[in-house]
């Protein structure tokens, strides 16, 4: 993962012919220059300043797929301003005046953006799935964020204020998630049109003409939003709009009150059924049925701690709070930057884990009285193997915990092993790690347990850990156990460049995937240190790789193949792959374990085993060799295309269905299967087939 640094105040205004690559000490002078150098997974770190034409920027700024632009998330980019506009031609909406265009899986975090030109749009998203997080979008004369086509963005924790027609605008078939955004002083805070159907949750729309405006055939899901003090109405539904505002089994928990004419104005011809919202019946216009349901008063409206919004660890904190593994304070705060005592950490461990006891006896600490509030939690965490005391028989419950102590506790308690000290190269200050913690830190790096804000290149092992850092470490530990899905953060440690990998994959198109799989012990190579990525894979080898990576659960009884005897090396893997629905035999009750696997068989196997619904066969037309796809497999190919499972032929755009699948192709498509299941984070790659 490459990091490029940009400083608009840099005296070096032309690094185009520089002999040394840019780094934190020699930053690039413009974001435009950084975008030209960026590859998928590149992080572009912006320093404070103004990014405009006067300082050398060219608009619109086009962010390539998989590139992350990061400013300062703590204050929503207050001191990092992108100001400018340029003409962009959209295939669907012709010419537009735009500041910034986000490609698929691109990310924009912690900047401030404005477009004061006539009909100016801040961020344009068209048929892509990027993220916009902890950013300020203001003074855009038409719209702050426009989402078009089949886009599925994540727009979260942004301040979208003082824009013209709309704060966030979705059209066509756009979906995605709008989460915890603050939309203020705009025509319509959030506008949804055509057939868009996003999840809209925990947003605050106040001081607009209309809080949320729905038209045409939209079907959004609205939960825990606060629509207050908008001049005309809190929510307007027109034409054939059918918003989901809750039902008795899943209350809406939205707050609609104090708006101008109406809190809810249903101008459609059909009746809306809503349930579990804070809204006065007399403030409703149109056909609406209120389904009675009891909802706790404290659960209404945005469920965000008042001091967590915009914090770098917010997504981890809120995910744990939602699962009741973390709590805040009675005053509505979480105090993410507050310190954590050893007793508080023990209580958190005891609440989060229910593991077999590693130690048979309970140890008594002479400074932990039987009536101490954390005595039981300390005992439970100690017996599970997470914590120990000091040599003098004390636990020191009120002493603040350090980062290295937290790491050692989690690694020991979870029984994680296999330290590779080479991974310590991820941290510039690795010499400061105490000897008792080096192995644990190495393991934590490999398992991606650790995060450091604002500088992920340092460990700060002896620094007292904050409540936010503990939340991230804990969340990542639960990811390691398979209990929670992975989340992205640029502050998580990345061990990949420092871990040894196969000696024949450097520069290979599949290297990022194979390196990630190898570090997670999901694949292994040969005794000579190779993986042989371009070697064809046979059915038995594929079954073994599939079982190791996916560990499929049985959905049908076992069968006996005549040519796979119990003593055959791949017998158990073949049986498990068959029972999991990924592989079948032939009509004569044989399996042909040594038969090489074709790419089409690999795709059909994954579509079948993952239970993908056959897709629209029109999708296969994007492949130049679509005519070679067998009729029986066209639905599976369409489904696998929609699920982003398919890696195209590395040498052209063909599907190459009858070509023999290689070991690399099988491993990467299996990696994409784990991404589809929510187990692994996606890796941007130009070889993945997008929809």
Image (tube, rainbow, N blue to C red):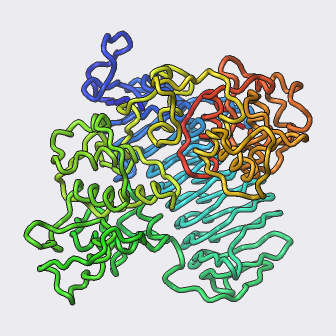
Quick one: quadrant of the N terminus? top left
Residue 99, given in percent of the width and then of the height, sits at 53, 36
Which residue sits furthest left?
Answer: 392
Q: Nearer the viewer, residue 485 or 155?
A: 485
Location of residue 494 with respect to 657 vertically, above or below: below
Quadrant in which residue 193 is drawn: bottom right
Quadrant in which residue 208 is drawn: bottom right
Quadrant in which residue 24 is drawn: top left
Query: Residue at 34% of width from left, 67% of height from top?
Result: 358
Location of residue 659 with respect to 344 vertically, above or below: above
Query: Residue at 36% of width from left, 44% of height from top?
Result: 418
In the rendered image, is residue 669 in sight? yes
In the rendered image, is residue 311 in sight? no
Q: Nearer the viewer, residue 527 or 37?
A: 527
Would residue 562 be found to the left or right of residue 381 on screen?
right
Query: Residue at 83% of width from left, 22% of height from top?
Result: 625
> Exactly how many numbered labels are in the figure?
0
Query: Residue at 58% of width from left, 44% of height from top?
Result: 548
Quick one: quadrant of the C terminus? top right
Residue 11, given in percent of the width and then of the height, sits at 26, 21
Q: Nearer the viewer, residue 235 or 315?
A: 315
Location of residue 688 with respect to 172 vertically, above or below: above
Residue 173, given in percent of the width and then of the height, sits at 75, 49
Location of residue 636 with respect to 260 vertically, above or below: above
Would residue 126 be found to the left or right of residue 29 on screen?
right
Residue 36, given in percent of the width and then of the height, sits at 48, 22
């Amino acid at each position: 993962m490459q990091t490029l640094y940009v400083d608009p105040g840099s005296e070096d205004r032309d690094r185009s012919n520089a002999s040394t690559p840019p780094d934190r000490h020699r930053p690039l002078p413009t974001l435009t220059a950084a975008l030209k150098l960026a590859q998928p997974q590149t992080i572009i770190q912006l320093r404070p300043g103004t990014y405009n034409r006067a300082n050398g920027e060219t608009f619109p700024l086009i962010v390539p797929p998989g590139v992350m632009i990061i400013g300062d998330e703590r204050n929503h980019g207050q001191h990092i301003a992108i100001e400018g506009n340029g003409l962009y031609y959209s295939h669907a909406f012709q010419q537009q005046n735009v500041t910034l265009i986000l490609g698929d899986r691109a990310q924009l975090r912690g900047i401030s953006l404005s477009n004061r030109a006539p009909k100016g749009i801040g961020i344009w998203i068209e048929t892509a799935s990027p993220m916009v997080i902890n950013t300020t979008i203001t003074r855009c004369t038409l719209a702050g964020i426009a989402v078009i086509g089949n886009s599925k963005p994540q727009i979260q924790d942004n301040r979208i204020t003082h824009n013209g027609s709309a704060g966030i605008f979705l059209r066509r078939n756009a979906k995605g998630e709008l989460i915890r955004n603050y939309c203020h002083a705009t025509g319509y805070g959030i506008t949804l049109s055509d057939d868009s159907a996003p999840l809209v949750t925990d947003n605050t729309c106040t001081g607009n003409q209309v809080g949320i405006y729905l038209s045409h055939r939209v079907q959004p899901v609205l939960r825990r939003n606060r629509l207050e003090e908008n001049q005309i109405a809190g929510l307007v539904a027109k034409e054939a709009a059918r918003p989901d505002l809750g039902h008795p089994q899943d209350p809406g928990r939205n707050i609609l009150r104090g708006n101008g004419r109406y809190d809810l104005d249903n101008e459609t011809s059909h009746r809306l059924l809503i349930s579990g919202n804070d809204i006065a019946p007399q403030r409703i216009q149109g056909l609406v049925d209120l389904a009675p349901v009891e909802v706790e008063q404290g659960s209404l409206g945005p469920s965000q701690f008042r001091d967590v919004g915009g914090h770098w660890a917010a997504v981890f904190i809120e995910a744990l709070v939602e699962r009741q593994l973390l709590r805040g304070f009675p005053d509505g705060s979480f105090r993410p930057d507050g310190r954590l005592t050893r007793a508080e950490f023990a209580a958190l461990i005891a609440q989060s884990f229910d593991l077999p006891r590693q130690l048979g006896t309970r140890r008594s600490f002479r400074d932990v009285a039987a009536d101490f509030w954390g005595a039981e939690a300390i005992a439970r965490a100690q017996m599970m193997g997470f914590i120990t005391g000091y040599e003098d028989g004390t636990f020191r419950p009120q002493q603040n915990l350090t980062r290295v102590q937290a790491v050692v506790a989690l690694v020991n308690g979870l029984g994680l092993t296999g330290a590779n000290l080479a991974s310590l190269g991820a941290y510039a200050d690795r010499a400061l790690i105490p000897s008792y913690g080096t192995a644990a830190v190495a393991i934590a790096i490999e398992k991606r347990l650790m995060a450091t804000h604002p500088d992920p290149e340092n460990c700060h092992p002896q620094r007292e850990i904050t409540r936010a850092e503990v939340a991230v470490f804990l969340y990542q530990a639960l990811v390691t156990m398979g209990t929670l899905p992975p989340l992205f953060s640029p502050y998580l440690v990345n061990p990949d460049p420092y871990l040894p990998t196969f000696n024949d994959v450097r520069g290979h198109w599949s290297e990022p995937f194979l390196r990630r799989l190898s570090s997670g012990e999901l694949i292994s190579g040969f005794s000579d240190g190779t993986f042989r990525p371009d070697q064809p894979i046979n059915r038995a080898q594929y079954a073994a790789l599939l079982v190791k990576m996916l560990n499929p659960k049985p959905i049908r009884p076992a069968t006996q193949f005549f040519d796979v005897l119990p003593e055959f090396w791949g017998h158990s893997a073949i049986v498990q792959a068959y029972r999991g629905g990924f592989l079948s035999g032939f009509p004569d009750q044989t399996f042909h374990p040594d038969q090489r696997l074709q790419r089409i068989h690999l795709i059909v196997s994954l579509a079948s085993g993952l239970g993908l619904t056959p897709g629209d066969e029109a999708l296969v037309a994007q492949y130049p060799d679509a005519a070679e796809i067998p009729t029986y497999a066209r639905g599976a190919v369409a489904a696998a295309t929609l699920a982003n499972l398919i890696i195209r032929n590395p040498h052209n755009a063909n599907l190459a269905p009858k070509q023999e699948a290689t070991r690399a192709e099988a491993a990467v498509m299996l990696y994409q299967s784990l991404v589809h299941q929510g187990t692994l984070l996606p890796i941007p790659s130009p070889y993945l087939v997008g929809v």
